[in-house]
Image (cartoon, helix red, strand yellow):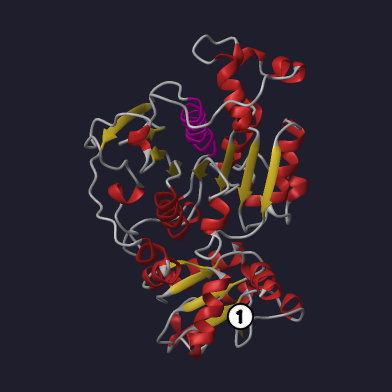
Amino acid sequence: MQRALVDPAPVLNSQQQSRYSRQIRIPEFGEVSQRRLVAAKVLVVGAGGLGSPVLQYLAAAGVGTIGIIDDDVVEISNLGRQVIHREDAIGVSKVFSAHHMVAALNPHVNVVDYPYRLTANNAEEIIREYDLVVDGADNFPTRYLVDDTCAHLDKPVVWGSILRFDGQMSVFWVGAPKYAQIPTFPAGGRGPRLRDVFPSPPPAGTVASCAEAGVLGALCGQVGSVMAMEAIKVITGMGQVSLGAITIIDALSGTLDHIAFCPSYIEPEFSENTAHYQETCALLLSEGTGEITAETLAAWMTQGRNLSIVDVREPDEVAKGVIPGAYTLPLTQLQLARSLEDLPSWIQHKTGPLVVNCRSGARSAKAIEILRSLGVTQLLNLSGGFLQWSATEKSA
């Protein structure tokens, strides 16, 4: 880096001097860098496996304002890798759980809560308020939305991805040439972005999710720590930032490689990039198995799209409310099916996507695995489940 992203805050008070003394005494860091962190505003997208270590290390380092956006709730299956959450937070919004832990770690950090999904309708308004975005999202629509919006607003993005034993990390920033030279990008041009490496979401079924393929919690910590360090370097102007290269971490072999890339994506107009991104990504994923947000589902229902909805909650839960037009098939009943013929006829003969929902998204993911194994295609998991649907309907 040639210069820092954030101007320094005023002189540190005595409490800040004491709290951050060990990093202030590093010659290459010093008090000015600490004052830059105190003045910085960072948005963390996702309070899950990657967001957990990122949030803890940025808060501990003294980043002054941290925004957290996530529409999910804490589940017991999260606790092995999402170490910012505790067992007593099961069923609680991940944003509120993470806020509580950040406040306990460093009460001097201003935490801003966004307990809902980042969408095309709110992304620009939210991201505009921050100096830097850390993308720890676990789905392709959100990753591409972050990339498109940050490219439009000229905001740096620290991006990470994990699966099984492998992790990837990079920094994307179209305005980076104003701050640093990037060997693989021409002078006077723009800086790197996600779409230079992955121009569009991968074909449905070619990339498994963590729920399908698994992931080790320690790898989340490893990649998340690297992401936090990159954010600190961008903010302070310290060291060499991973611009124009993907850092590849192979946890099994213990190797770390850097693969350089060049600009390869030709930008259309911003409105073409983002206006319909959510629906486009959902349509791509609907060809196989993916996620759909409550907002997109509501739009599809209003448009009269050819789709079916199945609720896999138990009867006592369904009695408290259900998505209009949804069929009901409790997961406990679905688990007894051994062939396609064992399923209701409306599943056997459907022609459009099947949206599966439960309370928050965990049981519906299991239901999708069963349905896929029985030969059902075009499956979409309702992100956040009925909880998110209810919240979306109330705010409409």
Q: Residue sitting at 38 percent across and 33 percent down?
A: 249
- Residue 192 colored magenta? no
Res. 335 in view:
no
In the image, what residue occupies the spot 35% across and 43% down?
Answer: 174
Residue 252 in sight here: yes
Which of the 4 quarters of the picture holds residue 7?
Answer: top right
Q: Position of residue 109 (x, y in %)?
A: 70, 34
> Residue 252, relative to residue 134: is it above or below?
above
What residue lies at 77% left-to-right and 78% top-to-bottom? Answer: 320
Residue 3 x/y as whole percent = 42, 25
**Which quadrant, please, contains the C terminus?**
bottom right
Name the spot of residue 339 as percent of width and height, x first. Answer: 45, 78
* Magenta-highlighted residues: 217-236
Rate crowding at label 1 as few (under 14), some (14 to 19) or many (20 or more) other CA atoms within 10 Å.
Answer: some
Quadrant of the rendering where the N terminus is positioned: top left
Instruction: Identify the element where label 1 is drawn.
Output: loop
* Left or right of 142, for residue 65: right
Residue 248 x, y percent position in the rendering: 35, 35
Near-viewer residue (169 or 112): 112
> Is residue 233 a member of the stretch shown in magenta?
yes
Which of the pair 396/314 is nearer the observer? Answer: 396
Secondary structure, magenta segment, majority class: helix
Question: Badge 1 is on which residue?
Answer: 329
Residue 165 versus residue 72: which sits nearer the camera? 72
Compared to residue 197, the image places residue 167 above or below, namely above
